Amino acid sequence: MVKSQNYFECISCSYQSVKWVGCCPECKAWNSLDEISTTKIDKKYKASIQPDQHLHTLDSIKLDEQARITSACSEWDRVAGGGIVPGSFILISGDPGIGKSTLLLQLCTQFHGNHSIIYFSSEESLAQVKLRFQRTAKKVPQELLFSDQASLGSIIEICKQKKPTLVIIDSIQSILTDETNALPGTITQLKETAFRLMRLAKENNIAIIATGHITKEGTIAGPKLLEHMVDAVFYLQKEDQWQTRTLRSIKNRFGSINEIGFFHMQGDGLQEIANINQHLLEQTKHAPGSTLVSSLEGSRPIFLELQALVVPVKYGIPQRIMTGIDHKHVSLIAAILEKYLHIPMSKHDIFFKISGGVKTKDQTCDLGIALALLSSYFQQPLPAKTIALAELSLTGQIKPIYNIDIHMKECKTFGFSSMIIANDQQFAKQSTPTLKRLTTVHELLLFFPDKNEMA
């Protein structure tokens, strides 16, 4: 027997209540409870399942040795962990107009092998999809099919009949299920849609990529359960005023969550930036307040230009304005310099940014931050083609970093003449740039012989 059941659920934390309340007791969000109407089936009407019907021993489970679905886009494959795993469910989110649909349309033409692909566009008409495709793609694979179907039941039936290798859904918030009376994009619809798509992927070995909307806070619209159910969650982001797009993995059951891919938005779509370091170094300038560092993003080092501007304070409270880095991190380094070098950073405004709109939290940038602050304070540039790689302790000691061999190899490739590292830094024997070993922050003053001209 089928019974109707109504309840209220918070759109922020999925808290459920039998009655409406203005403030969610769980997450304290106001006016966040929506009414949900569902159907419930009595237990006596459910089909009985034998206890051992779905139990298996480990030896009886057969592994599918099917290779990953790779593409000609190396940046996508890097973030995906080497390619898309058949039967996986991937969710891509980002701001409106960031390029999610453009990226997926371009990927449809770049996959290696003869993979059958179905692209479900529930937000745009097929004519609009064709216009976008003609602008971004050079050729149309014969195995690529399009549909503007928005019904989940119809999508599942089409996939079971055609048995494609890959299914792309744009977007999951606009899919409608017939089993619930709620509007598309609501919690009930998203839960039902995500669960059934996940079962479709696992039972039929179909890889599914779905785009998702985000809220004004920058999180994926819908319940947190949506992120837990899928196999991977990627964010496509725009880096400040630049046309650079970054694809970041915040969850990946089949790869690293620390990988990042770089793209550049052009008139004909997104172009991958395979050599991001060359792209970033072309924008650097040798000037006071500028320092080069290397930050490890996933498995590859990325060169960053740190820019500092230290000026005497004009108001009662010094300003600390940072872009691309935690302001507490820079303030901590400034406090270390003031403590041990007796430089009055507390009487100066500090403006700090990372060139190119890149963000980092890597502790290997500590020494570079200190050198950038001192370079701006003394108005003296560091030697050209010099990179700093070390951490700073609260006691003023310069400490070694991990994985320095990877950084050294990249520095050698791009012709850096010298590296500033910790005195007790260990690394494999290889040809390296000129090394300048330091023990304490007091030795940083050796790079600024003319200390009389202060900002």
Image (cartoon, grey):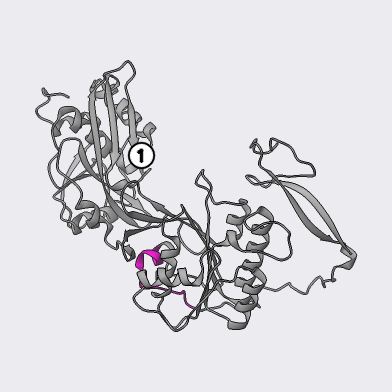
Q: Residue furthest left?
A: 450
Query: Taking 89 as reference, is 403 left or right?
Result: left
Using the rendered view, name the quadrant where residue 334 is placed.
Answer: top left
Q: Position of residue 296 (x, y in %)?
A: 34, 51
> Would you call the spot at circle 1 few (<14 residues within 10 Å), some (14-19), or many (20 or more)?
some
Using the rendered view, name the quadrant where residue 269 is placed.
Answer: bottom left
Q: Residue at x 28, y 25 (%)?
A: 349
Q: Residue at x 21, y 30 (%)?
A: 374
Query: Taking 423 as reference, is 237 left or right?
Result: right
Q: Position of residue 160 (x, y in %)?
A: 63, 79
Which of the two residues, 74 or 243, is positioned nearer the viewer here? Answer: 243
Task: Note whether residue 279 is visible.
Answer: yes
Q: Position of residue 11 (x, y in %)?
A: 64, 47
Segment tinted magenta in the rendering: 67-78
Disc 1 residue type (three-letter): Ile
Q: Residue furthest top?
A: 316
Question: Vertical placement of 33 versus 58: above or below?
Answer: above
Q: Residue at x 85, y 68 (%)?
A: 46
The question of residue 325 being in magenta is answered with: no
Q: Which residue is mark 1?
A: 325
Q: Residue furthest front?
A: 127
Q: Position of residue 197 (x, y in %)?
A: 62, 67
Question: Vertical placement of 212 versus 131: above or below?
Answer: above
Element under disc 1: loop
Task: Note whether residue 230 is visible.
Answer: no
Quadrant location of the C terminus?
A: top left
Question: Vertical placement of 22 versus 274: above or below?
Answer: above
